[in-house]
Image (cartoon, grey):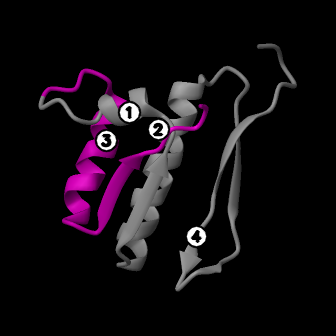
Amino acid sequence: MSPGDNVGFSECIFDNGILQPDFCFKLNYYNSVFKTKLSAINFAVCWSLENGVRIKIFSDGLSSIDVLVPTSIKCSFALNIKENIVRANGLVSLTWVRAHG
């Protein structure tokens, strides 16, 4: 990647089937797809914690989901996300969806 490449993510929130205003975030060009998908998961978890709302996260980032499963995580960024999920105490469910057939 080179400077100027667009790297980022957006979050779509539905409330009773109605799309709410979305959130869009631009990250530094050197962030990987893996880290970008982890950032999106983390944003959703933190949003749930701040708003006290039960959410379902659907992600096509299987490797990003898998890194959150082990009991010993070496990546501090992933560890922080897992701690946020634990703090959410049942408010968050995380599901993998196939993006490409």
What is the three-letter code of the residue carrying label 1?
Phe
Provide the secondary structure element on which disc 4 rests: loop
Instruction: Identify which amino acid the numbered label 2 is placed on.
Output: Leu
Q: Residues within 10 Å of mark 1 (few under 14, many from 20)?
A: few
Ranked by sequence position, the earlier of labels 2 and 4 is: 4
Labels 3 & 1 near each other (Cβ < 8 A): yes
Say which residue label 1 marks: 77
Q: Is residue 69 above or below residue 19?
A: above
**Which secondary structure, mark 1?**
helix
| Residue in view at x 12 percent, y 32 percent | 71
Single out the residue that lies furthest toward the bottom: 16
Q: According to the image, label 4 marks what residue?
A: 13
| Nearer the camera: disc 3 or disc 4 | 4
Give residue 38's mark.
2
Task: Indicate the amino acid at tag 3.
Answer: Asn
- Of marks 3 and 2, the one in the foreground: 2
Residue 75 image point, x, y percent: 32, 24
Calculate the distance from the C-alpha at mark 3 to the C-alpha at mark 4: 23 Å
Would you call the spot at circle 4 few (<14 residues within 10 Å), some (14-19), or many (20 or more)?
some
- Can you give x and y, in whole percent of width and height, for residue 62 in the image? 42, 32
Quadrant housing residue 63: top left
Query: What is the CA distance from the residue labelled 2 to the residue labelled 4?
Result: 17 Å
Q: Residue at x 47, y 44 (%)?
A: 97
Image position of 56 (left or right of 68):
right
Residue 92 percent coordinates (x, y): 32, 62
Q: Residue at x 57, y 75 (%)?
A: 14
Decide whether residue 11 is among the magenta residues: no
Quadrant housing residue 81: top left
Mark 3 or mark 2: name the one nearer the start of the chain: 2
